Image: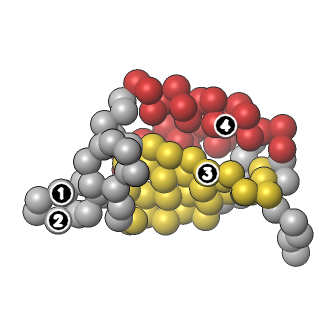
Amino acid sequence: MKSVLITFDQAYYERIMALLDRLGCRGFTYLEKVQGRGSKTGDPHFGSHAWPSMCSAILTVVDDSKVDPLLDTLHKMDLQTEQLGLRAFVWNIERTI
């Protein structure tokens, strides 16, 4: 199993939720308001008067077979609207309860 952390501009929320449903990624933790900036490009997301946009994040644990389809689709979404900001990070899950 893998853990996937998806950080994204709030404008992506509905599309990402639909993608998780379509791929059968049922369980997740949703963090509605997170702040940050990309390591290479894109505007900061600080929720301030200077940088008003905000990010959200979803942490989901999925079967290994779902990681590539999830990342491939997220990457395509990011390429369509690069300035919004969308990233995904994957970790191995050693054990769960």
> Marks 4 and 3: CB-CB under 8 Å?
no
Q: CA distance from mark 4 to mark 3?
A: 11 Å
Residue 68 horizontal/vertical position (percent): 73, 34
Residue 72 horizontal/vertical position (percent): 63, 29
Mark identifier at residue 89: 3
Residue 64 horizontal/vertical position (percent): 83, 44
Q: In the orientation shown, which residue stands out farthest toward the left?
A: 49
Q: In the orientation shown, which residue stands out farthest toward the front?
A: 40
Identify the secondary structure beneath mark 2: loop
Residue ID for mark 4: 70
What amino acid type should be assigned to the residue bearing mark 2? Ser
Identify the secondary structure beneath mark 4: helix
* Nearest to N terminus: mark 4 or mark 1: 1
Q: CA distance from mark 2 to mark 3?
A: 26 Å
- Give the side of residue 63 with respect to residue 25, left or right: right
Can residue 13 be seen in the rendering of this structure? no
Q: CA distance from mark 3 to mark 1?
A: 24 Å
Q: In the orientation shown, which residue stands out farthest toward the bottom?
A: 97
Residue 32 horizontal/vertical position (percent): 43, 63
Q: With respect to residue 42, does 6 lie above or below?
A: below
Residue ID for mark 2: 48
Residue ID for mark 1: 51
* Nearest to N terminus: mark 3 or mark 1: 1
